[in-house]
Image (tube, rainbow, N blue to C red):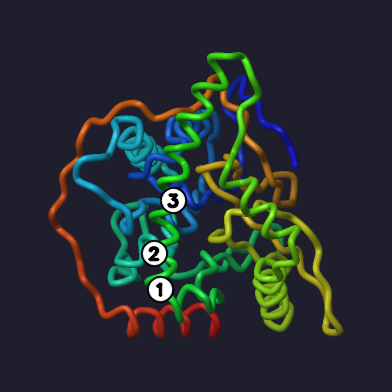
Amino acid sequence: METHIPKEKKNLEALVISDTHLGTYGCKAEALLEYLTSVSTPILILNGDIIDIWQFSKSYFPKSHLQVIRQIIKMMENGTRVHYLAGNHDEHLRRLIGMRLGNLVIENKMILELDGKKSWIFHGDVFDAFMHHSKWLAKLGAIGYGMLTVINSFINACLSFFKMKRVSLSRDIKNSVKKGGSELSSKFERTVADMAIIKGYEYAICGHIHWPEKKVMENELGQVCYLNSGDWVENMTALEYYNGDWHLVHFKPKQAAVSTNTDELVNDDYLLPNHKVLFQTMYNDIVNS
């Protein structure tokens, strides 16, 4: 993994970010804005869970979160093609799949060919059996995760006052689960990799699980480079394409990104789709691509 400390705009051939969770307390919107203004790319892929509709509140959408959206619009105005691939936290957008508006298109998945190599890109919740069979529990977990980030911010503020090292409670919990024998992430990666190998893709790119990764995975039929773009709640990671390959980059902001502005953004226009129909359509779109 590379550490990215911006000095001037970095020219990329393509960029993937995911799981920004705009509209939640945990989103590192200031850092994300700083990162987006530090790069230039003709292709920006927003790989799901960009705006967190699950936890969206009329009383909380800070100015910094709105500035991220404005920056993306500015990039589109300057010629960047933006592909919004809907995730589970912004699944209502799946009702708009296929919609094109200027340089913006909303899709379930994307097949991107660069330098003769194909990248299969989608959010990843299609292969998350737990989320679809226990959706209410997944939403409850998302609420608990949001509360944990608020508690974490308070703890880190106290630690900073005493000049002590910051901590990430949610990351520690996830790592302990992973080290404790959980096979959920490895099964997820294995499923994605095996499917990508069958389809003959060189890269398989997901988000969803908030674990940034780049590794080559093999089976008896061949191999594929599996990548996960991570998130902008804890890891502040992105996938950049340049010099003929994808690079997993960990962004290091100039200042700690803590949302403090509570300016409101009110929006009453919600679409309420049939989730089972949308999921089946999304599944067919991704798996049969």
- Secondary structure found at label 1: helix
Of all residues, the one furthest to the left in this rendering is 268
Relative to residue 72, is residue 223 depicted above or below? below
The local crowd at label 1, few if under 14, some if 14 to 19, many if 20 or more residues have their Cα within 10 Å, is few
Q: Name the residue under label 2.
A: 139
Question: Could you tell me which residue is drawn at 41 percent across and 85 percent down?
Answer: 280
Question: Could you tell me which residue is drawn at 71 percent across and 46 percent down?
Answer: 247
Q: Mark 3 points at which residue?
A: 81
Is label 3 in contact with label 2 (beta carbons under 8 Å)? no
Question: Could you tell me which residue is drawn at 33 percent across and 59 percent down?
Answer: 54
- Secondary structure found at label 3: strand
Relative to residue 168, is residue 276 depicted above or below? below
* Amino acid carrying mark 3 in the image: Arg
Is label 2 in contact with label 1 (beta carbons under 8 Å)? yes
* Amino acid carrying mark 2 in the image: Lys
Precedes in sequence: disc 3 or disc 2: 3
Residue 246 in picture, x, y percent from top left = 70, 51
